[in-house]
Image (tube, helix red, strand yellow):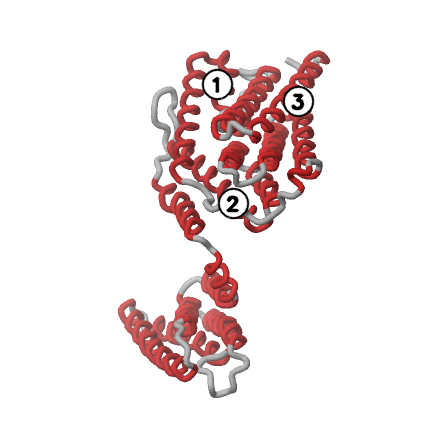
Amino acid sequence: MELDQLISRLAVALGIGLLIGLERGWKTREVAPGHRAAGIRTFALCGLLGGIVAALARATGTPVGAGLVLGFGFAVYAAIFALLERDADRAAGSYSATTTMAGLLTFALGAYAVLGDVRAAAAAAIAATVILAVRAEIHGWIARITWPELRSALVLLAMTFVILPVVPDTPIGPSGGVNPREVWLIAIVLAAVSFLGYGAVRLFGAKRGVLLSALAGGLVSSTAVTLTNARRAAAEEGAPVLLAAGVAVATAVSFLRVVAIVAVMQPALLTMIGPVLGVPTLLAILYAVYAVHGRGAVATDDKPMPAAFTNPFSFWPVVGFAVFLGAVIMLGHAVGNAFGAQGALLGAAGLGLADVDAVTISLARLVPDPLGPIAASLAILTAVTSNMVGKLAIAVFIDRGRFAAELAGVTVVCWAAGLLVLWGVMSLGAVSH
């Protein structure tokens, strides 16, 4: 290693110690000098010491020698630092291992800055300093979190980072089958949207929380928002009109997603799809605004989370619904393969129940051959309609009350408006064959 490179790496090791020591020193700034075991100067020296020991280890020229020097140096340092911190804690009458761990980490990161990736060492030091600095916030958050919330968060993390990487990514089953990874991703999206809605309501209150979570959830899956809100309505965890307004917002976002995909992949289809989905989008937003601000029953609903609102999501219902959507996808593939190009509408109707975006992308790629603009546009609109039918079926099956009635009204109005616009576009011949 060149001298200038070694000096720059040692400077990073020193900077790591200064950064962590700044936070530790600020926490003990009111303690009189000589009455604290480790402050900014001590941590700065610890980081530099780690770098020096690593440089000595590297200078041995052999892996065995480097390991012995680095291991012995760290062991001696750890023993001295831990003993000093133990005595400091006894004198202060406290019991904490945080400063000891911070000291060991400072030495290790200083050594890694010399032997490894400087950027990774600096990033780890910043992350460690942030964790140390937000001690009070972390403890307060832990004090407020409930067991169902923690359990749901752990389940969601396990679904995403433990199970997803090992789920097969190849289709299984007849007629093209279904991809297990895609089905599991649907389950993760359903759980994540439900968790997001729960967190939004708890943080921002019922009115703003439901609408914010619906807006964010609609960017991923309006079906997931519908499923979540239908369960909340059935469990009386919110005003049905407000929950229906959330679905309307998510539906409007899903319409805009389709328009955006078409605009990017096949702009020629916008002459039909743009106005046909644009008007229902506006109507869905107007309904949501009226439901939130124009009805007295909802005006008083901006209160903390209802007492029954205690579980972000249930694991098995989420997985079961994802498996159901996977079966629908397989059925849609089977219909499309059985009827060929003539089965585009039937296939779109089946696949649209699960994923409108995927149908839109696949159909846009088929223009102009083998599908013309009109056929592709109608198939995409069929998928959108099918998706709305699926969301209405979810609402009716789960709730069978005011929420389902409100959502049915929104759906019918959007259908009627879309059909009228479609009739007008077709009559004007705005879309070429």
Is residue 311 shown above or below 65? above
Return the x and y of residue 152 as percentages of the image width and height. Answer: 42, 47
Q: CA distance from mark 2 to mark 3?
A: 33 Å
Q: Nearer the viewer, residue 216 or 212?
A: 212
Of helix, strand and loop, which one carries label 2? helix
Report which residue position mark 1 lands on: 347
Residue 62's label in the rendered image is none
> Which-is-in-front pick, marks 2 and 3?
2
Q: CA distance from mark 3 to mark 1?
A: 21 Å
Report which residue position mark 3 lands on: 276
Q: Nearer the viewer, residue 121 or 289?
A: 289
Q: CA distance from mark 1 to mark 2?
A: 34 Å
Is residue 166 shown above or below 71? above
The amino acid marked with disc number 2 is: Tyr
The amino acid marked with disc number 1 is: Gly
> Which-is-in-front pick, marks 1 and 2?
2
Q: Could one spot residue 4 in this view of the protein?
A: no
Q: Nearer the viewer, residue 420 or 269?
A: 420
Return the x and y of residue 281 as percentages of the image width and height. Answer: 66, 29
Q: Are marks 1 and 2 in contact (CB under 8 Å)?
A: no
Residue 198's label in the rendered image is 2
Return the x and y of residue 162 as percentages of the image width and height. Answer: 36, 46
Q: Nearer the viewer, residue 117 or 21?
A: 21
Of helix, strand and loop, which one carries label 3? helix
